[in-house]
């Protein structure tokens, strides 16, 4: 059985009176690929912004665990420190670089 590497538990986020997410939970296991699919406005980007630290801990309800340890990201830097980064689909690619070089542009892995 594969280990849980990421757990988001009962995540809720509101923007004033609008509930963007309500009690959303997910688990990601070792050697697993997970896709979030949904209509516009379903909350996919909001969930990923919470995971990547764009929305800091305290601005949403629920918990995030990485490798069975609760984490609280107050910034994208906090998330990056734990190995969580977000690549946006509107990324501008440099045609002379490889796929890996484009992904890590400005932040080469150590």
Image: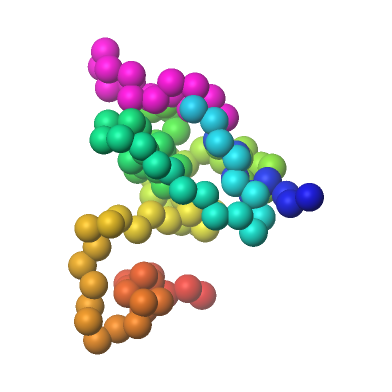
Q: Is residue 21 magenta?
A: yes
Residue 55 in view here? no
Q: Is residue 72 magenta?
A: no
35 or 51, which lies in front? 35
In this rendering, the answer to whether 89 lies above or below 97 is above
Which image quadrant for residue 58? top left
Q: Magenta segment, principal secondary structure? A: strand
Residue 83 in the figure: left or right of residue 90 = right
Count the marks: how many? 0
Residue 23 location (% of width, % of height): 49, 22
Residue at 48 percent of width and 54 percent of height: 84
**Range of magenta residues:** 9-23
Q: Residue at x 36, y 37 (%)?
A: 38
- In the image, is residue 79 above or below residue 43? below
**Residue 82 picture location, percent across and down:** 54, 54
- State the residue in front, 74 or 35: 35
Is residue 76 in view? yes
Residue at x 35% of width, y 58% of height: 87
Expressed as whole percent of the image width and height from the top left, the position of residue 2 reads 74, 51
Side (left or right) of 95 relative to 76: left
The quadrant in which residue 8 appears is: top right
Extreme right residue here?
A: 1
């Amino acid at each position: 059985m594969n280990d849980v590497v990421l757990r988001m538990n009962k995540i809720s986020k509101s923007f004033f009176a609008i509930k963007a997410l309500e009690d959303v939970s997910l688990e990601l296991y070792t050697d697993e690929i997970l896709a979030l699919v949904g209509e516009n406005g379903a909350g996919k980007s909001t969930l990923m912004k919470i995971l990547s630290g764009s929305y800091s801990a305290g601005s949403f309800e629920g918990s995030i665990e990485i490798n069975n340890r609760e984490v609280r990201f107050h910034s994208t830097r906090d998330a990056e420190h734990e190995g969580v980064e977000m690549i946006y689909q509107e990324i501008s690619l440099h045609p002379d670089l490889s796929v890996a070089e484009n992904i890590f542009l400005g932040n080469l892995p150590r």
